[in-house]
Each structure stands twice: as C-alpha cells, then as structure tokens.
Image: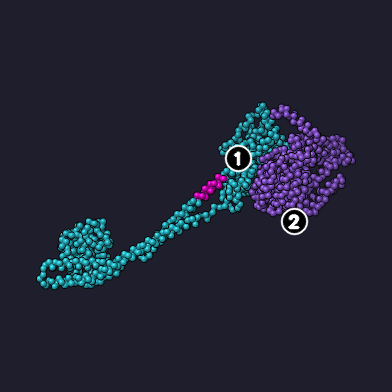
C-alpha cells in the first residue's frame, strides 16, 4: 500500500489534468441524472412514485480514442446452420473483425456437439490467418451451446482486463441440446461472467432458437440481444455490435439505491435487481459514449403533510471510467415535495421521466402478456396488451409524446397478432427482442 | 486292410493340422482377451486422469474459498457483518450464495430477523433440510483428496493471469482489513486453525445439484459457500480438452461427461457414434453422481486373423499330405516289390517241386534196384544221403508253399482216414538216419492205436518242422521222446528233446514268422525262420494248436489236432 505515500500519486492526475486541458470543455465523467416523474406529490396520501436513475455516457475526447476490446465470437455450426447461414455468419464475423485493429484481442470458438477453439485469443496484428480459419468453418452436428460459451469465456480470460471491453458474441440458430439447456442455467452462467466483467451478446438466427435462453444469458451479463430472421442481416447486426463494443466508455456500474424515510421499494422496471429491505442493488455492465441508460424504480411513498419536502432515496453509483482508467463514484438524492394543489402537481410533472416510466411499465405488461400467452391464455394476453395500449394512449396524449404513441400502436398490433399459432414463434422472438432492447436501452 | 494306409495317412495329416488349428485359435483368442484387458486398463487410466483433472479444480477452488473464508472471518468482530457477506456474494463470480450457522446449527446469515432478498429467501427455503442435518458438516474421514499433494499454481486460479490483477480490486476492502487483523485482540491467528474442519457437500434440490463448501471457523461457526453451479460446470468444461485437443489425446474415441440424471454435459474426442459405452466410471466426491463414459469403435470380434491362421495350416496340411502320399507310394512300391519276390519264390518253389519229386522217385527207385543187387555199401550210403537231402529239400519247399498259402488264406484241410501212430512211425523212420547222424536217439510212445479222420499232410508237416528243428538246434542231446495220445476229440503228439531248451523271453517270439532264435544257436545253422510259425498256423487251421509246454530240460512241444468225427 505504499502507493498512497508515493509522490506519483499526485503527479499522475496533475499530468492528466494538463493533458486534458485542451478538451476540458467536457468532463470525462459519467453523469448521474436522478429525477422523479412526479416531483410534487399529493399530500396526506400514501402513493406510488417512479424514480428514474439516468446515467449518461460522456463522449470520448480525442478522435480515434476508444477502449480496446477483447472479443470472443462463439459461432453455432450445428447441422441446422449449414448452407447460407454458416456462410453469412462467416462473412459477418470477418467483416466485423475488419473494424478492429491491433489494440484489440479476438478469439473464435465454434460448437456443434463438440467445441472447437478455431482462433485462440490473439492480438490482432495479422488478421489474415484468422480470416482463413473462419472461412474453414463447416456446419454439422448438435448444439453444445453451454460449452461453447464456456470455452469462449476461457479465451477471453487469457487477456481479461477491466480496462477493456470483454465480450462474447454468441450466434445460435438452434436449441441447446448438449449440456445445460434451461434459460435459468444459462442465466446463472451469464451472471457469473458479468461479475468478471464479461458480457455476452446473443444473436438468435432464424426461428429455431430459444429466445428465453438467449435473452436470459444476455440479460444477466448485460450484453445485447438481437433476433435476426434472415442470415443476410447478420453482417449488419455484427457491425452494430462491434460499434457498440467500441463505444463503451464506462464499465462495471454498480448501483445502490437506499430508500429513506419510510419509502418502500416496490420493483425495478425492466432490470433485475436485488431488493433487501429498503435497499435495491443492481448493476450495469457497460455504458456507451453519448448514450443514456436508465433504471426506473417504483416506490411507495407514505403520506406526508402538504408543503413538506422529503428525501425519497439516496443513490450511489460505482463504476470504472475507461477514459481515465480509474474507479469513480457518483452520489445523488431524490427529493419530493408535497402539495395539496392538483394544479401544482400537474405543472411539476417531469415529462421525460414519466415518459420513460410509462415506457417501462408498458414493457412489463408486454412481458406479462407473453407469459400469459405461454400458458395458453390468448385472451388474457390480449387483455393485458390492450390495457397496456390504453395506458400508453392516455399518457401519449397527456405528455404529447410521439414515442409513446408509437408504442401504443405496437401494443395494439401485438394484441392482434397474438392469436396466430403459426406466427407465434416468430412473434415471440420479436417481442422478446423488443422487450429486451427497451429494458436495456440497447444501442441498436 | 486295403484302406488302412490311406486312412492312416489322412489321420497323419488331419490330426496335427486340427491340433495346431485349435491351439492357434485358442492362442489368438487369449491374445485378444489380453489386448481387451489392456485396453480396458488404458481406458480406465484415461478416465481416472479426467477425474483427477476435475478433482484438481475442486482442490483449487477449495484453497481459494478457504482463503476467502479466512478473510471473511477476520472481518468478524465477533459477529460477521451481513453487508460484507452480501458484498462478497455480489462480487463473487463463483459463489452464488453464502450462509453462516452458529455452533448449534442455527442460521446467522442470511439474517434470521430482517429483510431478505428474493435469492436469499430462495436459498433459505432450499437449504432448511440441510441445516437440520449437522452430521453432514463433518469432515469426511481420512480424505485422500484434501490430504493430497499441494496443488500447483494456487494463486492464478483458473489460469487467468489478469485475475490476480483484479483480485486486489475485488477484495480490496477485505485485504486492507486483513492487514490490520493481527492488531485486533479478538482475532485469532490468521491461518484457519483447523484446516480439517471443512468439506464439500453435494446437495440435491429440485432435481438439481448444489455444491456447497463449508468451513468452520475457530469459534465453531460454519460458513457455507453455495457455488454457482452453472459457473462450476463451465469451469469444469474449460478444464477438459476442446475438440481439437481431444482428438489429439484420445484418437478415435470420445469421452462423455454425464450428470446424475444421465444428461450429456460435455463431450470431446474424434469418435462420433452411438451405442453402449465401452466403460463407464463414476466421478469422485463431490461429483459423486456424475460419471464419465468412454465410447470408441468396439473391439472387433472379427479381427480374429482367419487368413493369417488358415493359410499356414493349409500349407502344413498340403505339405503333410504330399509327404504322406510320397511315403504311401514308396510303401506301395516296396509292397509290390516284396509281393513280386514272394511270388517269385513261390513260383520257383513250385517249379522246383516237380524235378525234386522226380529226383526223389528215381533215387528211391534206384535204391530199391540196388537193394536187390550186391553193391558197395558206400553206394548205399550215398543213396541214403541223396534221399535224405531230397526229402529235406521237399520239406523246405512244402514249408514255403504252405506258408504262402497261409498268407493267402488258401490253406484247406484235406481229411483222410489213417492211423496216426503208423504215420508218425513212418516219419520217424525217414528222420532216423539224419537224427542218428546228429547224435539224437528217437523213442516213440504210441498211444492211439486206431485209425482216425484227420489231415495227415498237416501232421506230417508239423512233425517235420519240429523234428527238423531238433536236428538243427539240439544236436547231440540224446533222447528225443515222442508220445501220442487221444485227448477227447483231439489228437495229441508231444515232442520233447533234451537240448538247450528255449529261453523264457523267447517263448512267444519263436512262433513269429521269420524269427530266429539267438545267434548262439543260429551260428552255423541254416533255416528260413518260418517253421514253427507255420506249424502252429497249420495246427490252428486244423482246429488245434501248437504250444510250448513247460518241462525240466530241453524243449517240449505239444501238438493238438482236432479230429473229425
């Protein structure tokens, strides 16, 4: 611990400061933006409120500056991938790798019933042998998805570093049938990988994959998820994904929300969090340049007298800043005031926050609808979606938000297309993808 | 008898070939069994090494967790701070949940009073039964795994160099307090005081397997680490070879890792095929319910090298058959040659018989003529010699011809009515001069005295041979006694000399054709060697026998001939 005594400790930030002076116009820091959908609340009444915790990624200063990436591409080469699909996957992978340079590390793992490390983790000095190895991939066999992801993670671990983006990109078009195959098990693997700083992006190709498994794996590790119906679109998705990888500015965001003064946390919308008493903990793996990610927490606020003000919650965010390569901490508090005047309450409404909250609530409805539909209750699912559409419609009007209006249209369309048996498989994948993207504010 | 030689030859060929074939087959089978056993042994070794590989993971995990447990224990003052335990769970990639029991097995963490997260509540529901069975938290007896040699590379757990770089970050808080720990008066020595008081539990819940590492602190409290089983499996898989390495290590075989329900977890190796496993082996605790299966193309039952075995056998059979056939031809030629010789002798004997008969006839006629005239006694004696020699010659020829007939089974009995005593008398008379010359006196005790129906030719030939033998083998032996009597329906003649007799060892062999008694006796004695054998054969054809009777000195032969009614 002699670092703390060393004079370098003072020297380094000083030099950094000097270096940054030309770009000092914008701080190289994540901004924490706490807001309440209803900053002024009804007095003398217990009620629910939505707290939005927004995190804004800063823009990397200096052109060409970016965080190095450590990417493992895990490709399904089971029998169902043969033909066009595998060819597209190969080309998409190669095109995506072409965007990287020698700062980055790439590995390629393929799996059928066996797992093969086609390209062990390598720094990208000479991509030609890597392309050759990728072009040699042929399809055939079963689907050992779990083992494939495991070996991909092993390749990443060879150069694991918290100061780079560590990501597994998993492409699968079929059901895992060798090794663990339940969404819960894959989710737990994702959870474990997330704690090491590895995120898993899952790309479902065609209509044969298990969307629950893929979204769970992505969700627990805070990666991305995409549903690609046509193999020709793979190249585009890979481009998006690599763009996403290269724009990460902060990682390992650990968020702790402590509810104060008798406020009770009810649920975290969209994301998975741990609720213990008045504390809510969750984490985000990555934050991208100039992108906002947010959480919406629904809380119950006890009755308060008019004219009083109350601290609802204290929020603390710890993260790794990839620009400064230093851990950083953000703090904030959420304040609400209480009024008896309905007009005052309505005037105070924070429109963007309410919009975000409504979007997430509707997203939750959509999830519920899928679950209901899975149980075979088509009518119940439709009712949920209609309820969701009604909520969206009302709020769209109140907030004059075209975004919510579009979402309302979507919900109505979903309600219509719910009943078709033959279309359900595709529809479900689409819904899962949309829900996932909405909940995680995926960049693409 | 015609097929005896070919039969023998066939046997000669078949028996060794079959014997060799059988031996070869057995040998090859044994060899195959041996190879099979060796292969099984090899497979077992391979599976055991996989098991050890996986055990190695648990050993490393155990070291890591023990270290973490010790670090957590240093934070206890005296109670473990719940938020630190939660922080640990939140940050750990390997541990899914944590629990803490006091000395009496009561739960301390997750806190029994106070709010729990959903995951914690879930854990409490699942593990209630486990906490109620304190006997599970006993170190397993003499545990070979924990006592095993130190594990390699303890610090870079999971082969991640970068991870050690991470560790200070991850455990920065724990470490810093760890450094202060010795200063705290309540904190005991840093190293776990009782390293034995820890162990693994494999706990089944909802048809799933939970792996728990428990560690007892010096105060008797038990820390339990519930592993993230997906991560555990992932790490175990990462220890196993991938497809490329697997093919290199195993060749054309595959090893499958299966869990307690028989689900395939991981598979490596080049062989792809279904069917039963060549070998299945359970894994060691705490993966007790899992097992490994070894699959490979089966030991071919058809690999018995038929071609390699049959061809030499066929060659051997052909060689033997060829050799046999050559021997057979040689033997046939010899036989034919011998037959030709015998025929020739018979022919010659036959041809000799006519001139000899004439010779005898005219000698006797001359003797008769001269008997009426007064001639020189010398002439008489010459004539007697002539008669004697020609008689001997005709006996010899008779013998040869009879022998040939016996060989060809063409000997027939021609019975006539005659007085055997008189016939014997006559025979003795013809022999008398010869025997006298050799210093043998004759005495005949005739005891039949009446005509009987028998073959006088046979009797004559037998007696000729016996007397001839006496003349040859017992010269100067004194009295030669003959006796005849009737024994029921058998005509018996006993011939007893006082010569050197016959050795006990030769008693049987003297009747064999072409056998001649020892050199001492045969020195200077001529003979064909067929006499006694022929005599006995003749007696047997006549329904009787010729036997050598025991007697005090000399030889005593008894002739029995069955007479016709």
Residue to which mark 1 is pinned: B56
Residue to which mark 2 is pinned: A422
First to last magenta residue range:
B33-46
Q: Residue at x 48, y 51 (%)?
A: B30
Near-viewer residue (A403 or A419): A403
Q: Is residue B350 above or below residue B515?
A: below
Chain drawn in purple: A
**Left or right of A416: which side holds B401?**
left
Q: Is residue A37 above or below residue B528?
A: above
Near-viewer residue (B115 or A16): A16
The span from disc 1 to disc 2 (Cα, nearest Å) is: 50 Å
The quarter of the picture where residue A224 lies is top right
As drawn, the residue found furthest toward the left would be: B374
> Residue A185, position in %: x, y?
68, 45
Chain drawn in cyan: B
Q: What SS does tag 2 mark? A: helix
């Amino acid at each position: 611990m002699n670092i703390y005594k060393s004079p370098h400790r003072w020297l380094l930030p000083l030099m950094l400061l000097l270096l940054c002076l030309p770009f000092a116009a914008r701080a190289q820091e994540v901004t924490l933006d706490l807001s309440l959908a209803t900053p002024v609340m009804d007095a003398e009444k217990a009620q629910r409120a939505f707290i939005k915790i927004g995190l804004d990624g800063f823009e990397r200063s200096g052109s060409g500056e970016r965080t190095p990436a450590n990417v493992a591409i895990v490709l399904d080469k089971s029998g169902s991938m043969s033909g066009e699909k595998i060819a597209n996957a190969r080309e998409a992978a190669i095109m995506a790798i072409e965007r990287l340079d020698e700062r980055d590390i790439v590995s390629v793992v393929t799996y059928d019933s066996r797992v093969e490390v086609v390209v062990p983790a390598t720094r990208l000095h000479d991509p030609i042998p890597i392309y050759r190895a990728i072009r040699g991939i042929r399809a055939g066999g079963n689907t050992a998805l779990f083992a494939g992801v495991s070996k991909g993670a092993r390749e990443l671990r060879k150069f694991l570093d918290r100061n780079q983006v560590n990501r597994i990109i998993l492409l699968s078009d079929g059901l895992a049938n060798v090794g663990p195959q339940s969404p819960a098990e894959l989710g737990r693997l994702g959870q474990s990988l997330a704690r090491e700083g590895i995120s898993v992006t899952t790309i479902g190709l065609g209509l044969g994959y298990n969307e629950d498994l893929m979204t769970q794996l992505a969700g627990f590790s805070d990666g991305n998820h995409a549903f690609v119906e046509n193999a020709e679109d793979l190249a585009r998705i890979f481009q998006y994904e690599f763009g996403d990888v290269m724009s990460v500015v902060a990682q390992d965001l650990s968020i702790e929300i402590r509810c104060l003064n008798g406020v009770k946390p009810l649920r975290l919308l969209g994301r998975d969090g741990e609720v213990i008493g008045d504390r809510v903990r969750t984490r985000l793996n990555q934050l991208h340049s100039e992108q906002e990610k947010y959480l919406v927490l629904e809380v119950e606020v006890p009755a308060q007298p008019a004219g009083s003000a109350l601290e609802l919650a204290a929020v603390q965010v710890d993260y790794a800043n990839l620009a400064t390569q230093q851990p950083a901490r953000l703090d904030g508090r959420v304040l609400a005031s209480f009024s008896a005047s309905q007009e005052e309450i309505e005037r105070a409404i924070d429109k963007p926050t309410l919009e975000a909250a409504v979007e997430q609530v509707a997203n939750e409805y959509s999830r519920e609808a899928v679950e209901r539909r899975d149980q075979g209750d088509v009518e119940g699912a439709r009712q949920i979606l209609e309820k969701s559409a009604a909520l969206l419609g009302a709020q769209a009007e109140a907030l004059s938000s075209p975004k919510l209006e579009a979402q309302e249209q979507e919900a109505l369309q979903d309600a219509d297309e719910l009943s078709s048996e033959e279309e359900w498989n595709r529809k479900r994948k689409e819904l899962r993808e949309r829900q996932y993207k909405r909940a995680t504010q995926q960049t693409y | 008898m015609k097929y005896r030689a070919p039969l023998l030859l066939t046997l000669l060929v078949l028996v060794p070939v079959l014997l060799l074939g059988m031996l070869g087959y057995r040998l090859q089978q044994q060899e195959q069994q041996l190879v099979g056993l060796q292969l099984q042994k090899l497979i077992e070794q391979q599976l055991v090494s996989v098991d050890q590989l996986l055990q190695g993971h648990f050993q490393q995990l155990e070291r890591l967790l023990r270290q973490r447990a010790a670090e957590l224990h240093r934070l206890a003052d005296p109670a473990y701070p719940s938020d630190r335990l939660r922080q640990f769970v939140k940050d750990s990639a390997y541990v899914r949940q944590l629990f803490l029991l006091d000395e009496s097995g009561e739960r301390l963490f997750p806190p029994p009073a106070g709010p729990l997260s959903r995951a914690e509540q879930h854990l409490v529901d699942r593990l209630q039964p486990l906490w109620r069975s304190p006997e599970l938290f006993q170190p397993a007896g003499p545990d070979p795994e924990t006592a095993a040699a130190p594990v390699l590379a303890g610090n870079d757990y999971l082969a991640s160099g970068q991870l050690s770089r991470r560790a200070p970050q991850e455990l920065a808080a724990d470490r810093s307090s760890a450094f202060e720990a010795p200063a705290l008066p309540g904190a005991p020595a840093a190293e776990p005081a009782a390293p034995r008081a820890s162990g693994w539990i494999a706990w089944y819940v909802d048809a799933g397997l939970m792996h728990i590492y428990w560690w007892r602190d010096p105060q008797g409290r038990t820390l339990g680490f519930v592993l993230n089983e997906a991560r555990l499996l992932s790490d175990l898989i990462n220890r196993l070879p991938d497809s490329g390495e697997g093919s290199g290590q195993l060749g054309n075989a595959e090893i499958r890792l299966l869990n307690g329900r028989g689900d395939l977890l991981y598979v490596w190796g080049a062989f792809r095929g279904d069917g039963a496993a060549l070998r299945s082996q359970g894994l060691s605790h705490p993966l007790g319910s899992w097992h490994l299966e070894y699959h490979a193309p089966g030991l071919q039952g058809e690999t018995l090298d038929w071609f390699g075995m049959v061809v030499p056998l066929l060659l051997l059979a052909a060689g033997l058959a060829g050799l046999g056939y050559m021997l057979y031809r040689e033997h046939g030629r010899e036989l034919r040659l011998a037959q030709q010789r015998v025929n020739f002798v018979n022919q010659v004997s036959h041809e000799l018989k006519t001139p000899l008969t004439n010779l005898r006839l005219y000698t006797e006629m001359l003797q008769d003529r001269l008997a009426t005239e007064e001639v020189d006694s010398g002439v008489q004696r010459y004539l007697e010699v002539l008669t004697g020699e020609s008689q001997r010659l005709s006996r010899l020829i008779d013998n040869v011809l009879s022998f040939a007939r016996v060989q060809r089974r063409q000997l027939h009995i021609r019975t006539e009515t005659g007085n055997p005593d008189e016939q014997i008398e006559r025979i003795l008379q013809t022999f008398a001069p010869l025997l006298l010359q050799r210093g043998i006196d004759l005495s005949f005790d005739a005891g039949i005295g009446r005509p009987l129906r028998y073959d006088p030719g046979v009797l004559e030939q037998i007696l000729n041979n016996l007397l001839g033998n006496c003349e040859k083998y017992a010269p100067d032996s004194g009295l030669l006694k003959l006796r005849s009597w009737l024994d029921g329906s058998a005509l018996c003649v006993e011939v007893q000399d006082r010569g050197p007799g016959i050795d006990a060892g030769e008693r049987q062999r003297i009747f064999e054709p072409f056998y001649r008694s020892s050199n001492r006796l045969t020195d200077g004695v001529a003979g064909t060697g067929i006499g006694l054998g022929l005599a006995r054969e003749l007696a047997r054809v006549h329904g009787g026998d010729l036997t050598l009777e025991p007697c005090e000195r000399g030889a005593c032969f008894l002739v029995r001939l069955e007479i016709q009614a």
